[in-house]
Image (cartoon, rainbow, N blue to C red):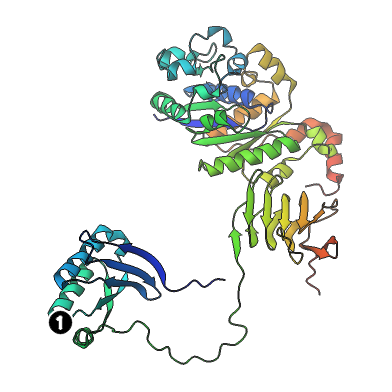
């Protein structure tokens, strides 16, 4: 699964007096900062203090601010917006249950809702969205003594030298020479395949089967190895087919 | 003047690290550079023997690090070349007597006065190896055209990459052109295809090496030896010169060359 929940909890910080707390969440549109209960002056101070403490984290952020029931007038809100702007933060939305505050925000050109209704989109056609599977891409030569283990698929752009080892839960694809030990479908997936431009592993395993590479004659050709029943078979890639 | 620190390493033992260190040091010194060799093989020292300086050892590298003598006192001046020095290993201690940061500090102390600091690494990839590469600016990996040596070299190259010492450079030692021609020895191309690093030089097998090692006279000082010529060329390449590889085939005689033309799949 590629998608992660949009509302990832990032941090929670308490002010010393435990009343004016500041809560921060990562959302799709940037950061959502929720101010706790208390007087505006106190909450305002707590927010700035919090931002000051982690200035690097906030710099460049797009922030939506949830102020709860707080009634804010143009003067207060525009001052806050400028203060945030001075710290490199863009305030783009203010959320509030107070109609006055909402109106203030609108006057200043700020949004008052996080999720705008999305424009109608044409029904997704089948070929534009695929459920991918987890894989890692390794773009280097794996030298002797290097062991790469991954529960998903493994793609290597480079050589896998003798003495190196790849253990993958899924498939193994090598754009280069594969001469180390390779184990695909290590957790028992008999559908797993191994392919390489030069498939000459010291030892090749798929699920529970072990195969040795026969002596090759002539030029290496791209090959794909898979399980055919109980035996490992390797097929040459043939562009003519 | 700031010296470059070059560490000679191989992983596998017996491929010629110590011989290469002694000869490269002598060749660089013969080119007029100030060179110091450091034997990092604590407990199994032999760079002093190969350089013929064994009987002059008073203090060693552990004495320096542990403050029993000054750095200058442990530097043995070579008999033949005035700007070649050796800091010998301690024979009675083990690799743990030094730490990687000791080596870095030691080399930092030497850098201002020298042009080259050559470190002879012990075999293996443990503490001694890490001591030897810690201060390195350049790592030279020595291998023989033989599967097990190449495998270990590959491992060492991977470790050097992991230490972010930049790409290692390769010397192929003890190549026998005759055996390569017969297909009984890995060819240079086979080694390079696997290791995929910059080739610094190829040193042919040469029985003069054994004789000079036993005598404690670096072979680069012997003008007739082909291996000595190979080491001298490598030293010049280290100095940034472009020197073509030796034509080792030329030693194989006319018949050998004709045969190689007909070798199937020959390059």
| Displayed quadrant of residue A10 | bottom left
User: Which residue is pictured at 32% across the width and 84% down the height?
Assistant: A113
User: Quadrant of the image for the N terminus of chain A?
Assistant: bottom right
Horizontal arrangement in the rendering, residue B136 relative to residue B124 (left or right): left
| Displayed quadrant of residue A118 | bottom left
| Displayed quadrant of residue B40 | top right
Name the residue that disc number 1 marks.
Answer: A74
User: Which residue is pictured at 41% across the width and 12% down the height?
Assistant: B69
Give the secondary structure at mark 1: helix
Residue at the farthest top position: B55
Within-10-Å neighbours for mark 1: few <14, some 14–19, many 20+: some
Image spot of residue B165 (x, y percent):
51, 40
Pick the residue in front: A81 or B233. Answer: A81
User: Quadrant of the image for the C terminus of chain A?
Assistant: bottom right
Pick the residue in front: A52 or A97. Answer: A97
Q: Is residue A45 visible?
A: yes
Residue A60 drawn above or below residue A124 = above
Horizontal arrangement in the rendering, residue A28 relative to residue B255 (left or right): left
Q: What's the chain of the residue with tag 1?
A: A
User: Which residue is pictured at 22% across the width and 85% down the height?
Assistant: A98
Horizontal arrangement in the rendering, residue B236 relative to residue A161 (left or right): left
Residue B215 drawn above or below residue A23 = above
Pick the residue in front: B27 or B179. Answer: B179
Horizontal arrangement in the rendering, residue B76 relative to residue A226 (left or right): left
Residue A88 drawn above or below residue B239 = below
């Amino acid at each position: 699964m590629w998608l992660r929940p949009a509302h990832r909890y990032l941090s929670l910080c308490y002010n010393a007096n435990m009343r004016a707390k500041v809560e921060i969440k990562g959302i799709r549109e940037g950061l959502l900062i929720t101010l706790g209960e208390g007087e505006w002056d106190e909450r305002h101070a707590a927010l700035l203090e919090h931002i000051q403490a982690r200035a690097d984290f906030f710099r460049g952020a797009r922030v939506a601010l949830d102020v709860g029931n707080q009634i804010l007038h143009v003067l207060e809100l525009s001052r806050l917006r400028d203060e945030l702007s001075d710290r490199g933060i863009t305030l783009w939305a203010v959320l509030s249950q107070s109609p006055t505050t909402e109106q203030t925000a609108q006057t200043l050109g700020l949004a008052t809702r996080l999720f705008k209704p999305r424009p109608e989109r044409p029904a997704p056609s089948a070929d534009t969205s695929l459920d991918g599977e987890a894989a890692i891409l390794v773009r280097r030569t794996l030298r002797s003594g290097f062991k790469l283990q991954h529960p998903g698929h493994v793609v290597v752009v480079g050589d896998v030298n003798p003495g190196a080892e790849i253990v993958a839960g899924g498939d193994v694809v090598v754009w280069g020479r594969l001469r180390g030990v390779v184990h695909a479908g290590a957790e028992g997936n008999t559908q797993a395949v191994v392919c390489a431009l030069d498939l000459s592993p010291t030892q090749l395993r798929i699920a529970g089967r072990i195969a040795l590479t026969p002596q090759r004659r002539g030029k290496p050709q791209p090959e794909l190895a898979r399980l055919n029943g109980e035996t490992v078979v390797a097929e040459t890639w043939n562009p003519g087919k | 003047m700031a010296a470059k620190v070059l560490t000679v390493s191989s992983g596998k033992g017996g491929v010629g690290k110590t011989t290469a260190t002694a000869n490269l040091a002598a060749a660089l010194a013969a080119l007029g550079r100030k060179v110091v060799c450091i034997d990092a093989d604590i407990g199994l020292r032999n760079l002093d023997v190969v350089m013929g300086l064994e009987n002059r050892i008073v203090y060693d590298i552990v004495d320096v690090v542990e403050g029993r003598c000054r750095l200058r006192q442990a530097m043995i001046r070579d008999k033949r070349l005035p700007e070649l020095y050796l800091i010998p290993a301690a024979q009675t201690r083990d690799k743990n007597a030094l730490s990687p940061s000791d080596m870095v500090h030691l080399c930092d102390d030497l850098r201002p006065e020298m042009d080259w600091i050559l470190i002879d690494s012990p075999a293996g990839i443990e503490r001694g190896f890490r001591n030897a590469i810690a201060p390195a600016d350049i790592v030279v990996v020595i291998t023989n055209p033989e599967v097990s040596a190449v495998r270990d070299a590959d491992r060492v190259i991977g470790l050097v990459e992991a230490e972010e010492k930049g790409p290692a450079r390769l010397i192929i030692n003890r190549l026998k052109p005759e055996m390569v021609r017969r297909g009984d020895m890995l060819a240079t191309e086979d080694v390079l295809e696997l290791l995929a690093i910059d080739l610094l030089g190829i040193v042919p097998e040469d029985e003069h090496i054994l004789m000079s090692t036993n005598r404690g006279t670096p072979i680069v000082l012997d003008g007739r030896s082909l291996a000595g010529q190979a080491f001298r060329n490598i030293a010049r390449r280290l100095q940034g010169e472009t020197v073509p590889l030796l034509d080792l085939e030329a030693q194989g005689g006319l018949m050998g060359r004709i045969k190689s033309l007909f070798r199937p799949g020959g390059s």
